[in-house]
Amino acid sequence: MLKDVWISINSIHSYDREDGDSLEFSTDGHYYFDGENGCFTYMETDVTGLEGTRTSVLVMPDQVVVDRDGMITSRMIFREGLRDAFQFSTPYGAATMGIDTRRIRHHMDEAGGKVEIDYVVDMEHAVATRNRFQITVTEKKEPVPPLGC
């Protein structure tokens, strides 16, 4: 069953220095859990610089797949300890990039859950950024009607 959820994202992007640029935002989204895999979707905003793009995240026991469609199109497959290449397409052109997933931690259930990924992005095998993000998915509860007087 598809549920309305609240999605909170905290990400850190660092270049040559240990501390990096952080971004935190929350948004509405949709979530589905089939007993083993969780999937949630949300629309990007101007806060992320990807406005007009829908992001879908499929969390499976051994990998996490992030699909983006709209202004930006890409499919990133995160598998701990493995490198994967992906096409990153924008209205201005496309580039092939790589991701080296260092660590994945996740727990998803009927009510939502949490995903944490630590990875490095490269272009032509040259490190571009180290990224860490944490996404928390929380089921929206129906408001309790006020007691009548």
Image (spheres, helix red, strand yellow):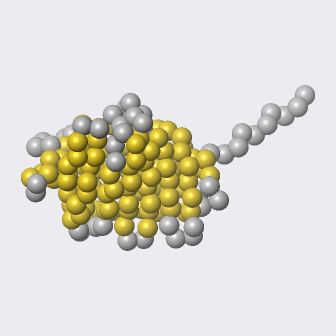
Residue pushed farthest top?
149
- Identify which residue is drawn at 40% across, 47% down: 69
The image quarter containing residue 34 is bottom right
- Identify which residue is drawn at 57% across, 58% down: 32
- Image position of 51 (left or right of 86): right
Q: Is 112 located above or below residue 24 in the figure?
A: below
* Picture coordinates of residue 6, whole percent (x, y): 54, 44
Q: Is 145 located above or below residue 133 in the figure?
A: above
The front one of 79 and 17 is 79
The image quarter containing residue 60 is bottom left
Q: Is residue 73 visible?
A: yes
- Image position of 32 (left or right of 127): right
The front one of 6 and 74 is 74
* Picture coordinates of residue 16, whole percent (x, y): 10, 43
| Quadrant of the drawing holding the N terminus | bottom right
Q: Is residue 8 visible?
A: no
* Picture coordinates of residue 105, whole percent (x, y): 37, 62
- Identify which residue is drawn at 42% across, 36% down: 52
Q: Is 15 located above or below residue 66 in the figure?
A: above
* Picture coordinates of residue 85, whole percent (x, y): 22, 60
